[in-house]
Amino acid sequence: GHGEAGVLDVRRPRLVRASTPPLASASCGATHTLLLDRCGGVWSFGCGLHGELGLGHFESKTSPTSVTALSSVVVVGLAAGERHSLAICVQGRVLAWGCRKHGALGLPPLSPSDSGLALPRPVPGLVGRLAVQVCAGSDWSCALFDGGE
């Protein structure tokens, strides 16, 4: 997220300056970062090899870039896994994108060479459920629902 000559691997912390609206939260995966602005907009940057940036392609970005595929919804929560990402919409719907390894998105891989899902899409097994929080790890995802389950 530093944007210096396209360098993605920065070993020492540095201030990231970006022209985003005021931010509410951030979530970091292994090599990508998600930002949630105060209006419910989502921004991403870092490695996009598996589609984890949600930008519709598998390219990396060195500076925060608006996830325009989510511009029609208000996002209230984010989680960045190792190589995948999750979002909760204001209506409680969970969206996922990025690496499908081990079913991390709630979707099986299409083939052994499947790179991932480059655009956010609803998690089929959670449609109709009201999520209040999401978290993600290496190859897993978890959602907490309004009833506490």
Image (cartoon, rainbow, N blue to C red):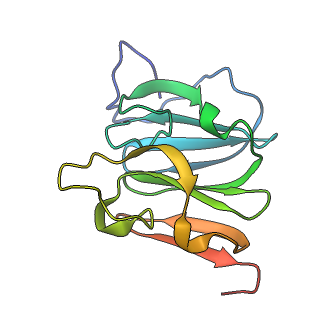
Residue at horizontal 79%, vertical 57%?
90
Which one is in front, 36 or 14?
A: 36
Which image quarter is the C terminus in?
bottom right
Question: Which residue does the image show at 44% across and 62% down from the upper left?
Answer: 105
Q: Quadrant of residue 78?
A: bottom right
Residue at coordinates 77% horizontally, 46% vertically from top-left? 74
User: Position of 38 compared to 52: left or right?
Assistant: right
Measured along the vertical axis of the image, is residue 84 above or below residue 21? below
How many discs mark residues in the rendered view?
0
Relative to 1, say whether 144 is above or below: below
Q: Specify the farthest residue to the top.
A: 5
Between 10 and 50, which is closer to the camera in this rendering?
Answer: 50
Q: Please, is residue 81 above or below residue 59 in the view?
A: below
At which x and y percent is residue 47? 37, 36
Give the side of residue 10 with respect to residue 114, left or right.
Answer: right
Left/right placement of residue 143 relative to residue 71 reads left
Tell me residue 41's x, y (percent). Answer: 72, 38
Residue 142 spot, x, y in % from top left = 53, 73
Q: Residue 132: percent from the left, percent from the top?
A: 72, 70
Q: Residue furthest left?
A: 112
